[in-house]
């Protein structure tokens, strides 16, 4: 019975009336700096005033959990470009409130590091030397605080990184259903929330162990979850044997979006002279060459990349990360402007169209790990994060042209 109604439902949901352009008349999709700033500032500001609380369990606490951490880190990136809405001060306020701590020790420790990119950005805006007290003249509160050094706000993350490097289990596989493997990067989302933090903190501290650890774990995940034939990632090992209703393999939209976002962030932080940099660049090009062929005519990607009939609704977090990847790749010379710019423009227009007049970004799939159909009112913080990162790249392109 379910399959009989699928084609009809797909037709109804795919009709133009089902997907209104919320931002039409309110926000412009013009590739111009002022227009980009307007829609991104409105979107972040709406999200700041509507931070979710439902579903924020002990494994994903407010602000320091992986979901909010992804958002806060993206906001801090945007605030370094445009702080007209006071987002930098807001990030600093949150950092102080949570004592600059990463997420609480969870079952999936990669997730705990997502917020630490925000801490690094805040520190980089006003970097301090590791030691700030040369001589103890008076034993008072100021001296004691000074003894903690200029890295004191980074110490909680540094301690967490040291712990993960030292105690990461050396399992011989990444089978997702093996409990011990949950401490490794056995799901593709982990490639976004952890590796960029390891690299950036390696750059800040000079600790090469962080970079070495990141490389070992990153390429192990690629080896297991990357389908070389399809040039896409399985979300985790459970999906390798599953098939969609149309017989295609199950490749989750946002899961692959996480990987594209990860590669862009990694290449932003990885030293230009790093000996394996070309491997990351090659993987990025391979994936984008496939992903661009899966874009819908309306500019969006779906939650199932290979079965848009069963899952016809637009999805703004996957689309946001792919939009980020397209514009980032063009700006950094990894993607041909002639070949990829049309898709990039169409994707940006789609993202802007998903913004409600009040700034809320809609069509964002809730927290999950598999394809599903969603509605226009759905919003989550990581969708707005992907939108902000894509806005940075669109603004950079507009400024250069």
Image (cartoon, rainbow, N blue to C red):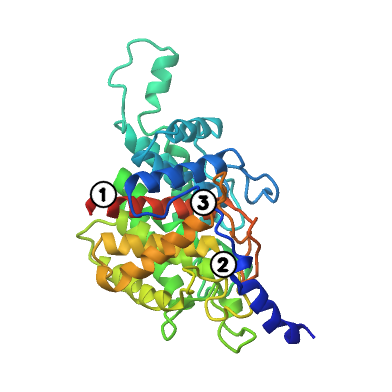
* CB-based contact (under 8 Å), mark 2 and mark 1: no
Asked where in the image residue 77 lies, by quadrant, the reply is top left
Task: Sort mark 1 into few (<14), some (14-19) or many (20+) by Cα contacts within 10 Å.
Answer: few
Residue 294 rendering spot, x and y as whole percentages: 46, 77
Check the image and name the residue furthest to the front.
25
Residue at label 3? 384
* Residue 399, label in figure: 1
Q: Nearer the viewer, mark 1 or mark 3?
A: 1
Compared to 52, does 377 lie above or below?
A: below
> Mark 3 and mark 1 in contact (Cβ < 8 Å)?
no
Instruction: Report how far apart the C-alphas of labels 1 and 3 lie in the structure.
Output: 22 Å
Query: x and y percent of residue 335 in the render?
Result: 28, 69
Q: Which residue is mark 2?
A: 314
* Image point (53%, 66%), residue name: 254
Q: CA distance from mark 2 to mark 1?
A: 29 Å
Element type where label 2 sits in the image: loop
Q: Is residue 362 left or right of residue 300?
A: right
């Amino acid at each position: 019975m379910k399959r009989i109604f699928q084609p009809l439902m797909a037709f109804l949901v795919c009709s133009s009336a089902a997907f209104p352009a919320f931002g039409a008349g309110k926000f412009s999709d013009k590739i111009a700096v002022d227009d980009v700033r307007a829609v991104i500032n409105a979107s972040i500001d709406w999200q700041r005033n509507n931070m979710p609380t439902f579903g924020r369990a002990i494994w994903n606490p407010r602000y320091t959990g992986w979901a909010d951490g992804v958002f806060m880190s993206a906001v801090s990136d945007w605030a370094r470009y445009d702080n007209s809405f006071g987002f930098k001060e807001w990030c600093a306020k949150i950092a102080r409130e949570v004592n600059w701590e990463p997420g609480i020790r969870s079952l999936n420790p990669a997730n705990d590091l997502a917020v630490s990119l925000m801490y690094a950005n805040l520190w980089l805006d006003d970097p301090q030397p590791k030691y700030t007290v040369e001589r103890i003249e008076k034993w008072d509160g100021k001296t004691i605080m000074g003894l903690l050094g200029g890295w004191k706000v980074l110490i909680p993350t540094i301690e967490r990184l040291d712990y993960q490097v030292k105690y990461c289990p050396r399992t011989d596989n990444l089978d997702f259903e093996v409990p011990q493997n949950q401490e490794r990067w056995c799901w593709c989302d982990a490639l976004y929330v952890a590796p960029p933090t390891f690299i950036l903190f390696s750059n800040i501290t000079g600790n090469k162990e962080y970079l070495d650890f990141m490389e070992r774990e990153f390429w192990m995940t690629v080896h297991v979850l990357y389908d070389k034939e399809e040039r896409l990632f399985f979300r985790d090992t459970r999906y390798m044997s599953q098939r969609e209703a149309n017989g295609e393999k199950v490749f989750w939209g946002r899961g692959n979006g996480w990987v594209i976002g990860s590669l862009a962030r990694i290449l932003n932080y990885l030293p230009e002279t790093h000996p394996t940099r070309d491997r990351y660049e090659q993987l990025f090009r391979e994936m984008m060459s496939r992903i661009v062929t899966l874009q819908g005519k309306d500019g969006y990607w779906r939650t199932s990349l290979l079965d848009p009939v069963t899952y016809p609704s637009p999805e703004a977090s996957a689309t946001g990360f792919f939009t980020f990847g397209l514009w980032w790749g063009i700006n950094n010379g990894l993607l041909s402007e002639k070949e990829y710019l049309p898709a990039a423009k169409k994707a940006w227009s789609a993202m802007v169209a998903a913004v409600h007049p009040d700034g809320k970004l809609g069509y964002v799939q809730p927290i999950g790990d598999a394809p599903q159909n969603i509605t226009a009112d759905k919003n989550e913080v990581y969708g707005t994060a992907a939108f902000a990162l894509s806005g940075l790249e669109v603004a950079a392109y507009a400024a250069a042209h």
